[in-house]
Amino acid sequence: MALDFAAAYDELNPDDRDHRFYAARAAELGATRVLDLGCGTGALSLRLASGGLTVVGIDPDAGMLRTAARRPGADRVDWRLGYSDRAGTASADFAVMSGHVAQVFVDDAQWSRTLRDLHRALVPGGTLAFESRNPSARAWERWTREATLRTVDAPEGPVEFWHETAEVTLPLVAYDTLTRSRRTGEETSNREVLAFRDAPTLVRDLEAAGFETVSLYGDWTRSPLTPAAPEIIVTARRRP
């Protein structure tokens, strides 16, 4: 039996520094209506909604949304299955993409459409925030079984889970997510591709979509962006 990735997602990704960062930004901006694009299992959406914000969570993965809908307080969020075109016009003053969602848009045309949809969804002066792995930090070189191996509990018993880089043709990086059941020995492999856009490219794409960049950080402590920084954390403002 394959690992239920949606059910195991939060166990596999316990670090919530990104969620704390985005919640703090929402508070600093005085946001009241939030769009969480690529909301996944809903952890960030629910954190924001618990603070009294009106939140729309959008994700194309039905399994992720089912997991989100079962969480305590899920009725506080408007969950929507689909992509950025599901967002209402001028429906948010703060939009966020966490969990490196920005990197799943490997096609430049799709990425541009997404940014335009986010521009449409935000009120004039509204804020977009997201992160993307810094390509100069070369994170894919550490995506090996030895470095990424974890074990999660599943109904059929413990399952090993790890990543292995398969191909690097920047800005695209293909990697495999592999699992192995310790009880049955059953193995699975799923290949995905991520886009590693550098900071000048992200700024250019944002400007083309009608945004002005407000800040670029290199990690969740708001340190400056440097070549060695692991992240490119972007905050941008929607122009009228």
Image (cartoon, grey):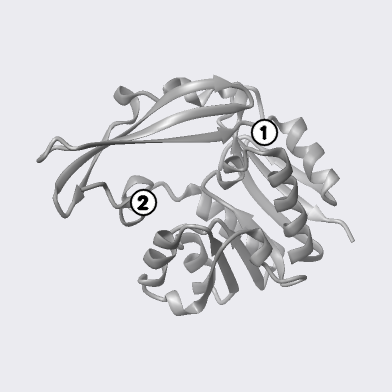
Instruction: Name the residue at the right extreme.
Output: 240
Is tag 2's residue or tag 1's residue first in the polypeptide sequence? 2
Q: Give the residue at mark 1.
A: 224
Quarter of the image containing the C terminus?
Answer: bottom right
* Residue 46 horizontal side relative to residue 70, left or right: right
Depth check: 41 or 2 in front? 2
Q: Position of residue 177 (x, y in %)?
A: 37, 35
Q: Is residue 96 left or right of residue 153?
A: right
Q: Which residue occupies 42% across, 23% down?
A: 142
Splitting the image into 4 quarters, where does residue 54 fall?
bottom right
Residue type marked 1: Pro
Q: Are marks 2 and 1 in contact (CB under 8 Å)?
A: no
On the image, numbered disc 2 is attached to which residue? Answer: 9
Foreground residue, 16 or 83?
83
> Judging from the image, what secondary structure is the residue with disc 2 in?
helix
Dot label at residue 203: none
Q: Residue at left 61%, top 30%? A: 134
How packed mark 1 is, by other alpha carbons closer than 10 Å (few <14, some 14-19, many 20 or more), is some
Furthest residue to the bottom?
75
In percent of width and height, residue 108 lies at 71, 39
Between the residue at mark 2 and the residue at mark 1, the CA separation in whole angstroms equals 30 Å
190 in relation to 101, above or below: above
Question: Residue 235 location, x and y as percent?
Answer: 71, 48
Q: Quadrant of residue 196?
A: top right
Q: Quadrant for residue 95, please give it.
A: bottom right
Residue type at numbered disc 2: Tyr
Residue 181: x and y in percent read 17, 39
Q: Is residue 181 left or right of residue 224?
A: left
Q: Secondary structure at mark 1?
A: loop
In the foreground, 53 or 145: 145
